[in-house]
Structures are given as structure tokens and as C-alpha cells.
Image (spheres, rainbow, N blue to C red):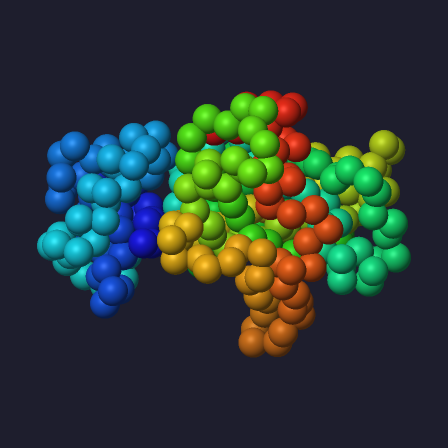
């Protein structure tokens, strides 16, 4: 199932994509479903089952050129992992430590599918990185690696935009600021539920600019697995 958030005359609305790529407004289909993906995920299995019914039986909204917003609006946390692809770390000559490098982005970095990135005049070295985005669907605190994937609501694509001159050359190496200029986290277009992803540890990750392939990797190159990262982070802060 592919969940999404689209822009309508009523504001941001939760939707689901049908097999023919038509969008069903989830709240219009069933008033039990809130108009936000975040709130639907908080309903647990009931929310997902109702959304699945909408995908199968719902009436699509009119039109075929709807503006897509970030699938999950206003997340509480955006937690990122640095140098987690073995091939990327090797390219940069970086030494991978025994524990992951963790940084965050502010929610104001979020942008939707096909949105423009703002190039800040404060940076002369804006860089790209395609990423797999993992969305946590319910409260996770001190979970084991064996439990970790039970808390995953779905996956989407992300662009980790960086101001390298801020990240690497400012006093103290300002990872947070270098990663957190407005618009530096486009994500989307959809939130794909785990039942459609056979193996999240074996997904191709590519970045293209004007048709040119600039990045080509795979999640089998992760230095720290998704299970490890979810468990590790949940020991530090509550994931939700």
C-alpha cells in the first residue's frame, strides 16, 4: 500500500494510491480515518486496514495532477545516520567507527515530491545524497533488534541535502546546521508499507541529476543495519 499526503482546497489531506495511480482521500472515504497520515499511523492496525479498504474500494478524487506533500507532515524527529554506506565511506576515505554517526534535521527542512530546493547564499558547497527513509509508526523505546522492524510503518525516498562548507569547515564542524537549511530534506512521493518491501536490506538507491546517474548504491552496503539503528536509537530517545 502506498500512503501519501496531497494538497487540496481543504489543506493537507491523507490519501492512498490505487493500482491505477488514482488517489483516494482517506477521510472522505471513511470518516473514522483522520485527514493526516501521522494520525492514521497512530491508530495502528485498524487505521491501516481502513486505508487498505479505501485503496481497494474507494472513489478516486477528480483530476490527475495533484500536488504531493511530504508523506508524513510535521514529524517529531528527523534522525539521520552519517557515513552509513560502506561504498560511500570508502569513496571519502572515512573510517567507520564501532558506533553510528547520528545527526538530525529540523522539520522545516522537509519538502515534498518535485519541490524545489532553496540554495542558501550562506553556502557555496551544496551537495546531494539519496537516502532510504524509514518511518516509525508507533512509540518505540528500548526495543531489541529482533523487535525493531515491528515498529516500522513504511519507507520512502529522501534527499539528504548538505551544505558541506558548514558541515565540515565551520568551527566544531556544524553537522546540524549544515544539514538543516530550509528545504534540505525533500521526501516522497509515497509512504510504502512494509508488506510491499520484500527486503529493506537490499534496495537500490540512486540519485540522478538531469538524467545523469550520480549515485548508485544499495542498502546491502549499510554499515549498520536498520534493526541495529532502530534499537540503538530507541535506547537514547523515544521514537514515534
Q: Quadrant of the N terminus?
A: bottom left
> In percent of the image, x 27 and y 56: which residue is there?
17
Q: Is residue 36 visible?
A: no
Q: Residue furthest bottom?
A: 211
**Spot occupied by residue 179 in the image (x, y as percentages of width and height):** 67, 42
On screen, residue 151 versus residue 233, left or right, reads left
On screen, residue 89 versus residue 121, left or right, reads right
Vertical relation: 169 (above or below) 87:
above
**Spot occupied by residue 68 in the image (x, y as percentages of width and height):** 35, 52
Q: Residue furthest front?
A: 146
> In percent of the image, x 48 and y 47: which residue is there?
111
> In percent of the image, x 51 and y 45: which residue is there?
134
Considering depth in this image, is 222 or 5 the residue closer to the camera? 222
Q: Is residue 234 visible?
A: yes
On screen, residue 36 versus residue 206, left or right, reads left
Instruction: Kindly indicate the quadrant of the structure image that contains residue 138.
Output: top left
Vertical relation: 208 (above or below) 201:
below
**Spot occupied by residue 10 in the image (x, y as percentages of width and height):** 21, 39
**Spot occupied by residue 85 in the image (x, y as percentages of width and height):** 71, 55
> In percent of the image, x 18 and y 39: which residue is there?
27
Amino acid at each position: 500500500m502506498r500512503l501519501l499526503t496531497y494538497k487540496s482546497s481543504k489543506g493537507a489531506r491523507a490519501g492512498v494510491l490505487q493500482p491505477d495511480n488514482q488517489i483516494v482521500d482517506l477521510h472522505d472515504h471513511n470518516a473514522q480515518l483522520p485527514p493526516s497520515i501521522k494520525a492514521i499511523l497512530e491508530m495502528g492496525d485498524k487505521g491501516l486496514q481502513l486505508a487498505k479498504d479505501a485503496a481497494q474500494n474507494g472513489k478516486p478524487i477528480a483530476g490527475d495532477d495533484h500536488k504531493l506533500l511530504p508523506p508524513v507532515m510535521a514529524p517529531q524527529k528527523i534522525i539521520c545516520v552519517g557515513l552509513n554506506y560502506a561504498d560511500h565511506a570508502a569513496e571519502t576515505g572515512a573510517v567507520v567507527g564501532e558506533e553510528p554517526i547520528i545527526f538530525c534535521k529540523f522539520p522545516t527542512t522537509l519538502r515534498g515530491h518535485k519541490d524545489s530546493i532553496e540554495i542558501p547564499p550562506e553556502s557555496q558547497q551544496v551537495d546531494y545524497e539519496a537516502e532510504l527513509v524509514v518511518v516509525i509508526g508507533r512509540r518505540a523505546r528500548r526495543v531489541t533488534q529482533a523487535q525493531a522492524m515491528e515498529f516500522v510503518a513504511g519507507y520512502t525516498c529522501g534527499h539528504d541535502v548538505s551544505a558541506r562548507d558548514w558541515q565540515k569547515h565551520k568551527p566544531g564542524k556544524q553537522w546540524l546546521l549544515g544539514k538543516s537549511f530550509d528545504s534540505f530534506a525533500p521526501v516522497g512521493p509515497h509512504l510504502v508499507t512494509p508488506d510491499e518491501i520484500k527486503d529493506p536490506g537490499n534496495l537500490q538507491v540512486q540519485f540522478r541529476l538531469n538524467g545523469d546517474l550520480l549515485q548508485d548504491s544499495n542498502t546491502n552496503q549499510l554499515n549498520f543495519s536498520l534493526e541495529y539503528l532502530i534499537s540503538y536509537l530507541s535506547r537514547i530517545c523515544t521514537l514515534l
